[in-house]
Image (cartoon, rainbow, N blue to C red):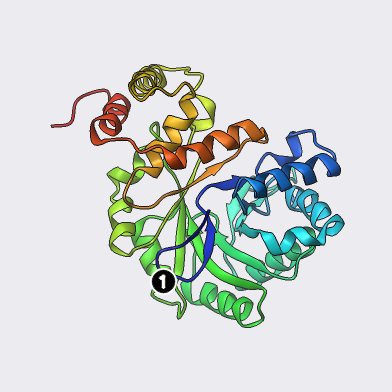
């Protein structure tokens, strides 16, 4: 299932396994190892991390214990991780959360991620959130050093607007190869802000986080998710598929942009459904039925 990311020679699986809630899955190291091996057997070999997942590299460290136990796994997978969100746990702190894209912080965080993950390189490293104090020249210096040393092979961003992406790219002599953004039938923001069309123009494949909208598309809790859930059931009936998550992943995969959805569940059956969606192609009527349900009105 390895797919080349459009504007590079980097290959990752079209479905990505998200590790944000790894510390809540209740797996011991052997169980996690089996889960990772099952994931690889499904053709899902790309794993998405961040330094803040679980707090202070915890999810990376749990994952790293498996790589320490079974060194064979590292050569079979692609590791993605992110940084720049900082939490202040001091009760007297001026602010609870802020962003840091300083050269020193980026390099130090990558070093911690490498140690936590028990690896000597990261396949793809992302800036997690746009930093209002971002100095693109300083980020470029950090990226250059990490790339030159072989500690990071490829770079990208997460949650960036088109202009934020272009500003950072303007200082780099290497390509940013992805933007990890929230896309789902519930979250259409990146159609409205034209990010989708910018990425298409630049031939950049985005990664889609929270494709199931945190589960509310399967278990609706407001009018909007109720509308979408009803449309999903109609489309599922139309193509004789029972599992709504297959329809949701197919909705993303059917878009010509070449979206890489992230499955964040620790349940292997949920991941299997994401993989099954690779063989399901929605037609335009089915795709727009879901889209207009999200809007709450017909397109003009």
Residue depicted at x 66% and y 47%: 41
How far from the left and from the top, in percent, is residue 223?
Answer: 38, 16
**Residue under pointer 1:** 169
Image: 8 above or below 229:
below
Is residue 197 visible from the viewing direction of this image? yes
The answer to which quarter of the image holds residue 91 is top right
Depicted 214 relative to depicted 193: above or below: above
- Please say whether residue 131 is visible from this viewpoint: no
**Quadrant of the rendering where the C terminus is positioned:** top left
Q: Residue at x 51, y 19 (%)?
A: 219
* Residue 8 located left or right of residue 63: left
In the displayed structure image, the side of residue 159 where residue 197 appears, left or right: left
Image quadrant in which you'd find residue 74: bottom right
The correct choice, above or below, for 64 with respect to 39 in the image is below
Horizontally, residue 136 falls left or right of residue 82, namely left
Location of residue 125 with respect to 66 vertically, above or below: below
Name the residue: 41% across, 20% down: 229
Residue 129 in the image: state x and y as whole percent. 51, 54
**Position of residue 294 measured from the top left corner of the image (x, y, whole percent):** 32, 27
Residue situated in front as seen by the camera: 129 or 148: 148
- Local secondary structure at mark 1: helix
Q: What residue sits 48% from the left and 32% below the top?
A: 213
Horizontal side, residue 243 vs residue 271: left or right: left
Q: Residue furthest left?
A: 300
Q: Residue 38 location in percent, x, y?
A: 70, 43
Graded by Cα atoms within 10 Å as few (under 14), some (14 to 19) or many (20 or more), the crowding at tag 1 reads some
């Amino acid at each position: 299932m390895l797919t080349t990311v459009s504007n590079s020679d980097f290959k990752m699986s079209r479905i990505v396994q998200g590790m944000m809630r790894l510390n809540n899955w209740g797996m011991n190291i052997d169980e996690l190892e089996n889960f990772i091996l099952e994931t690889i057997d499904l053709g899902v070999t790309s794993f998405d991390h961040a330094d803040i997942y679980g707090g202070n590299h915890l999810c990376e460290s749990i994952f790293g214990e498996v790589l320490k136990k079974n060194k064979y796994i590292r050569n079979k997978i692609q590791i993605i991780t992110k940084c720049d969100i900082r939490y202040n746990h001091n009760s007297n702190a001026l602010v609870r959360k802020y962003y840091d894209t300083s050269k020193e912080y980026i390099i130090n965080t990558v070093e911690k991620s490498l140690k936590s993950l028990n690896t000597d390189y990261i396949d793809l490293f992302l800036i997690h959130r746009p930093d209002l104090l971002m100095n693109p020249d300083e980020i470029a210096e950090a990226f250059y050093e990490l790339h030159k040393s072989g500690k990071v092979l490829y770079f990208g961003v997460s949650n960036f607007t088109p202009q934020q992406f272009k500003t950072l790219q303007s200082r780099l002599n290497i390509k940013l190869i992805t933007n990890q953004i929230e896309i789902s039938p519930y979250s259409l923001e990146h159609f409205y802000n034209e990010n989708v069309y910018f990425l298409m123009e630049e031939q950049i494949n985005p990664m889609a986080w929270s494709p199931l909208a945190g589960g509310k598309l399967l278990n609706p809790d407001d009018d909007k998710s109720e509308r979408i859930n009803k449309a999903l059931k109609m489309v599922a009936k139309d193509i004789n598929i029972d599992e709504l998550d297959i329809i949701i992943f197919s909705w993303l995969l059917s878009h010509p942009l070449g979206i890489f959805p992230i499955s964040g569940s620790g349940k292997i059956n949920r991941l299997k459904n994401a993989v099954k969606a690779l063989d399901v192609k929605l037609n335009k009527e089915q795709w727009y039925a879901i889209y207009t349900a999200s809007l709450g009105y017909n397109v003009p």
